[in-house]
Amino acid sequence: MRIHKMTDQKLWKEFHHLNSRFFHDKIVLKEIGYLPTKKMPKNANGFYDGHNKWIFLDSRLQDFPVLTCMILIHEMAHAYLDLQDYKGYPADAGHGMMFQAELTRLFKEGAYDGIL
């Protein structure tokens, strides 16, 4: 099997596809891309910055397009809930019940079809 490297351009394309299909084009970002591992938050493969409207993924993911898409959907769920003023409890990094319900919605609507 040949692995195709995910570039920033491909990441934007995937973001626009997912945003249109599962989030009704409501997520607006200023930046999306990859960062070197040393610039990522500790133990994070991706992160959403609601203040700056950024999503960044660990650059090591570029060789793993399926994993990249899974993490992108996860970060987009954070961005979508941010639009609804959901921050979650700090101790669980915003992964509380509303976040879990959002992931369930995405799963039921087919966001993970073809990648899980």
Image (cartoon, rainbow, N blue to C red):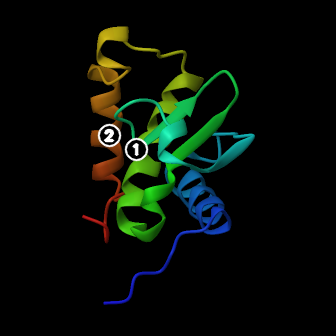
Which residue is at a point 56% across and 63% down the rendered structure image?
Answer: 14
- Quarter of the figure with residue 29: top right
| Amino acid type indicated by mark 1 | Asn
Which residue is at a point 38% across and 20% down the rendered structure image?
Answer: 94
Mark 2 neighbour class, 10 Å CA radius: few under 14, some 14 to 19, many 20 or more: some
Please tell me which residue lies in front, 42 or 78.
Answer: 42
Residue 73 place in picture, x, y as percent: 43, 49
Q: Secondary structure at mark 2?
A: helix
Which numbered disc covers residue 91?
A: none
Please tell me which residue lies in front, 77 or 110.
Answer: 77
Which residue is at a point 54% across and 48% down the rendered structure image?
Answer: 36
Q: Is residue 86 above or below residue 48?
A: above
Please tell me which residue lies in front, 71 or 78.
Answer: 71
Specify whether 11 is left or right of 47. Answer: right
Mark 1 neighbour class, 10 Å CA radius: few under 14, some 14 to 19, many 20 or more: many
| Amino acid type indicated by mark 2 | Leu
> For the view shown, which residue lies furthest in the right direction?
30
Residue 55 place in picture, x, y as percent: 58, 41
Specify whether 60 is left or right of 1. Answer: right
Which residue is at a point 53% across and 56% down the rendered structure image?
Answer: 18
Q: Secondary structure at mark 1?
A: loop
The residue singled out by tag 2 in the image is 103
> For the view shown, which residue lies furthest in the front direction?
38
Residue 89 visible at all: no
Residue 34 place in picture, x, y as percent: 58, 52
The residue singled out by tag 1 in the image is 45
- How many badges with numbers are in the image? 2
Quarter of the image with the N terminus is bottom left
